[in-house]
Amino acid sequence: MKIFIYLVIGFFLLIIYVRFLEGVSLFIPTRRIQATPRDVGLDFDDVYFSTEDHVRLNGWLVRAEGRSAQAGTLIFCHGNAGNIGDRVEKILNFHDLGVNVFIFDYRGYGRSQGHPTEHGMYRDAAAAFDYLRTRKDIDQNKLVFYGASMGGVAAIDAVTRRPAAALIADSTFTSAADMAKTIAFFVPSFLLKAKLDNASKIKAVTVPKLFIHSPEDDTVPFALGEKLYNSAPEPKEFLKISGSHNDGYAQSQGVFFPGIKNFLEKYDLL
């Protein structure tokens, strides 16, 4: 009887540990905006829009110079830490490709209201798309979701809900269960509250897809990026870069941005 009681106590302690681990690692928002596109010489629209569950979100629209109505628009779903102010350099790099860039903060990040959750993040990405559909200076047929790391989860879900023209999944993974195996291999996947099930959702994404990953990624194993790519239907492409999880795009600038440009040009989205 004592053994049974100890097992029950141990099981509940494990649940508490898993919930704690999810709580501190899934979403790591910051409120203070440390930089804006203006700090790198870019004009931008500082906009607010609402989700279907009435959460007010903040985003920035940086228009392509002289041709915003004809250019494609990247809907930038950033990773799980910080806020949009930490992605200014990357916004500039995308702007230099000749696209419009719309980056937004999930609920609980930056100046966006609310508290971050998995399903809230899905609503936020869909709301970003819906907001752009109200803009008269944006080509509605050239809306492309770009998701980095956790942002890839938001982007993949959004493409299953909204008629985007293409998807770019950068350094993202297959599911929370697969990621848990790399972080805490002893945790049973059924204990996880978060699903983040990219592997199942990607099977329904029929628009053109570009997957980007580095074998040197120190956060999301390259094997999970390959597995996600293999789960996706055609048309799809895989771009191998080098460098770490957070700095791969900078360490591989000569491959990363030309690769995205070639992909967008191929489908007339630039």
Image (cartoon, grey):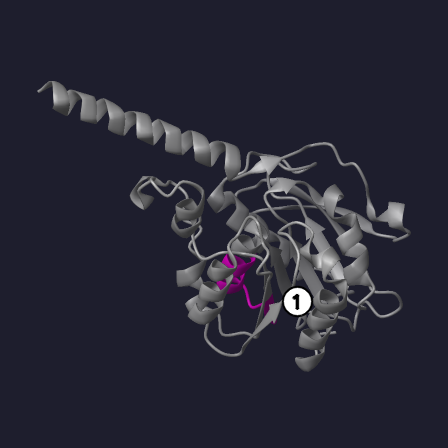
Q: Residue at x 20, y 25 (%)?
A: 8
In the rendered structure, the answer to whether residue 183 lies left or right of residue 40 reads left
Quadrant location of the N terminus in the rendered image: top left
Is residue 158 one of those drawn in magenta?
yes
Q: Where is residue 48 in the image (x, y as percent from the top left)?
A: 71, 44
Which of the pair 56/157 is nearer the observer? 157
Vertical order, 134 against 204 (above or below): above
Q: Give the range drawn in magenta.
A: 155-167
Asked if residue 85 can be seen in this view, the reply is yes
From this viewpoint, which residue is outermost toward the right?
41
Amino acid type at image mark 1? Leu
Which of the pair 110/246 is nearer the observer? 246
Which of the pair 188/204 is nearer the observer? 188
Mark 1, residue position: 143
Asked if residue 139 can be seen in this view, the reply is no
In the rendered structure, the answer to whether residue 216 lies left or right of residue 205 reads right
From this viewpoint, which residue is outermost toward the front?
216
Q: Which residue is drawn at 53% across and 79% down?
A: 235
